[in-house]
Image: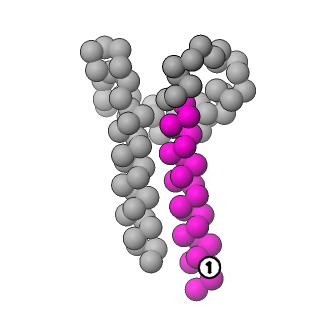
Amino acid sequence: MGTMIVVRNFVDVLFNVLILAILARAILSWFRLGPDNPLIQILYDITEPILSPLRRVIPPLGGMIDITPIIALFLLRFLQQMIMSGLY
């Protein structure tokens, strides 16, 4: 029983960290921070494995607006809910 609580908490924290990283990356994209910035490098390392496959499928709106972070947030939240409901 105690192991399941640890697993549920781990999964919940993992998804929340991924969601926050995507939000932070989207917000920081509005500022001119160089790719050599350590924070940007960490966020790219965390989020690119999630966003890159989505970018291959979802084209930018109007050729400029990347909506993959929004789609990723919805997908992550959906997966989180599905996994968490299976762990209860």
Mark 1 belongs to which amino acid?
Thr
The residue lying at 35 percent from left, 20 percent from top is: 65
Point out residue 5 in the picture as x, y percentages from the top left corner.
58, 76
Looking at the rendered structure, the secondary structure element under dot 1 is helix
Quarter of the image with the N terminus is bottom right
Secondary structure, magenta segment, majority class? helix
Point out residue 21 in the picture as x, y percentages from the top left corner.
56, 40
The residue lying at 59 percent from left, 30 percent from top is: 44
**Which residue lies under the disc numbered 1?**
3
Point out residue 17 in the picture as x, y percentages from the top left corner.
58, 49
Residue 6 position (above or below residue 52): below
The residue lying at 56 percent from left, 34 percent from top is: 24
Does the magenta segment cover residue 22? yes
Quarter of the image with the C terminus is bottom left
Task: Please identify the quarter of the rendering in which residue 70 is found.
Answer: top left
Residue 26 position (above or below residue 5): above
Horizontal side of residue 9 vs 77, given as left or right: right
Does the magenta segment cover residue 34? no
Q: How many labels does the image show?
A: 1
Q: Give the class, few, some or many, for how many residues have Cα within 10 Å of label 1's Cα (few <14, many ≥20).
A: few
What coloring was used for the rendering? one colour
Point out residue 54 in the picture as x, y percentages from the top left corner.
38, 34
Residue 16 position (above or below residue 37): below
Boundaries of the magenta span: 1-25
- Along the line of sight, the residue nearer the viewer: 56 or 18: 18
* Residue at the farthest bottom position: 1
* Residue at the farthest right position: 38
Task: Please identify the quarter of the rendering in which residue 58 is found.
Answer: top left
The residue lying at 52 percent from left, 28 percent from top is: 27
- Along the line of sight, the residue nearer the viewer: 45 or 32: 32
* Residue at the farthest left position: 62
